[in-house]
Image: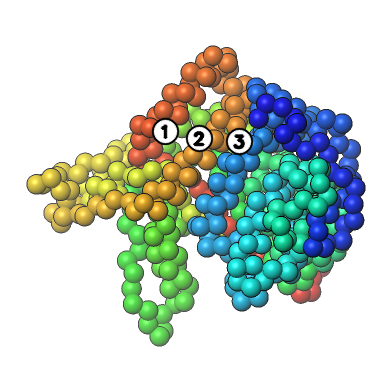
Amino acid sequence: MTSNENLIPSSAEGSIAPSTTSNSTKPSSSVPAKPFIIRNNRTYINEPSLLYPLPVDLAELHRQSLRTLMLFQLFGGPTTAPEFSNKPPSRVLEVGCGSAFWSMMCHRYFAQHGHSSISFTGLDIVPLVGSGLDQNWKPDKDMRWRFVQHDMRRRPWPLADNEFDLIMVKDVSLAHSTFMRDPQQLFEEYVRILKPGGVIEFWESDHTIRMLRPHVLKTPVVARADSDSDSDDSSEEEDDAEKLGAYVMTNNTPLSAPLNPFLVEYNGWAAKGLDALGLSAVPCTLIGPYLLQEADTLMEVRSKRLAVPLSEIRWEREGVGGVVTKDGKSYIDSMKRGGRPVDARGDKSRGKGLTAAQAALRRTALETVVGMILCLEPVLREVSGKSQDEWDGWSGKMMNDLLREGGTSWGECLEVGAWSARKKLTSTV
């Protein structure tokens, strides 16, 4: 994107009542006359006090949409909450909605199951598509859609108490530093606008990359009448994740720093640069504890974390057997006999290749990671001290290594997660 003309200048004034036609609210906070600014040929929100480091142009919206599609596949739909397996939500809020792609996909998912009357609300500081040009715009033609333009740093939000039975907070960890410094302020708003018994759900990804080390998944067992249901569920999750080409993460999942030299450099720059903005490079480590701290108002805290390798991993193809660890770094010493790897007991290990679907999902994860690195150019350049020419050279080599030369075959992975909790029917405070 090369000009602001491709984005929406501001939200139009309209009713806040949801209807079958789309409506938008008058901005409840000051917005610059020109809400977007061009830097380094990328479009950013023109709000100096907003520390959001990512651009908001079509290339970035496309990257975010790819990430959302990937998460839909990994989590089996628009929400992981079992409450909506048989009865869908009636009023849904997407916080930091951006292009409202998740809302559109959620609407389509439930509409395909016979539920097309769900009311959706999107909340964001500026409208990125649609609403500013045409009040009748909506993400999908038959959606009940409302857009609320509001700076989430200003509280209370222009939303009613107990209004929603599902609040989706997706990929907002870079939107404002409040989430890091004082999450209590945000949770007070979430709880206020959530119906008793309603669900708040977070989808998030870590912004630095670790390496998944060789390990054997839990061996499936035949369920018994007296078996632990949690263990059965865990085995099913591992089976489902493996079919998709991902790995369920537990406290025992072996992870370490990446071996790819470009990702090693990126990790150091990203962690330092985001920390300077008051942002976390590893938000997936924070959300669960934050939810557990809200025990007075939230219950049934659940989580699902997955590691998505960015390509086929050598130890998958060659077999886990024969892995040797030195100085905290893993490498394959397959000791092949007759062209086939063997494990330490002398058993032949049958490595397996990826299916087309698994390879496609991992490629999507890789492309969104590379896109993220390119989007963080201003932050990374400032920390690394690289000139424009130096950055262009580094980023070109990085893209070639990761996208064309199999630079992530040691096990570098994208870590994602979903967390959900229900609002208690009565508060204990």
Amino acid type of the residue that numbered disc 1 sits on in the rendered structure: Leu
Question: Is residue 347 or residue 113 the one in the foreground?
Answer: 113
Amino acid type of the residue that numbered disc 2 sits on in the rendered structure: Val
C-beta proximity under 8 Å, tags 1 and 2: yes
Question: Is residue 128 or residue 375 the one in the foreground?
Answer: 128
Question: Is residue 388 or residue 380 the one in the foreground?
Answer: 388
Image quadrant occupied by the N terminus? top right
- Above or below, 226 against 412 in this view is below
Amino acid type of the residue that numbered disc 3 sits on in the rendered structure: Ala
Which residue corresponds to the image point at 16% horizontal and 55% vertical from the top-left? 348
Location of residue 282 in the rendering, given as x and y in whole percent from the top left corner? 57, 43
Residue under circle 3? 59
Task: Give whichever of discs 3 and 2 has the lower sequence position.
Answer: 3
Image quadrant occupied by the C terminus? bottom right
420 vs 183, left or right, is left
Residue under circle 2? 370
Q: CA distance from mark 3 to mark 2?
A: 12 Å
Counting other residues with Cα less than 10 Å from the Cα at mark 2, is it few (<14), some (14-19), or many (20 or more)? some
* Number of the label disc, if any, that sits on residue 402: 1
C-beta proximity under 8 Å, tags 1 and 3: no
Assign a secondary structure to mark 1: helix
Counting other residues with Cα less than 10 Å from the Cα at mark 1, is it few (<14), some (14-19), or many (20 or more)? many
Assign a secondary structure to mark 3: helix
Q: CA distance from mark 1 to mark 3?
A: 19 Å
Counting other residues with Cα less than 10 Å from the Cα at mark 3, is it few (<14), some (14-19), or many (20 or more)? some
Task: Give whichever of discs 1 and 2 has the lower sequence position.
Answer: 2
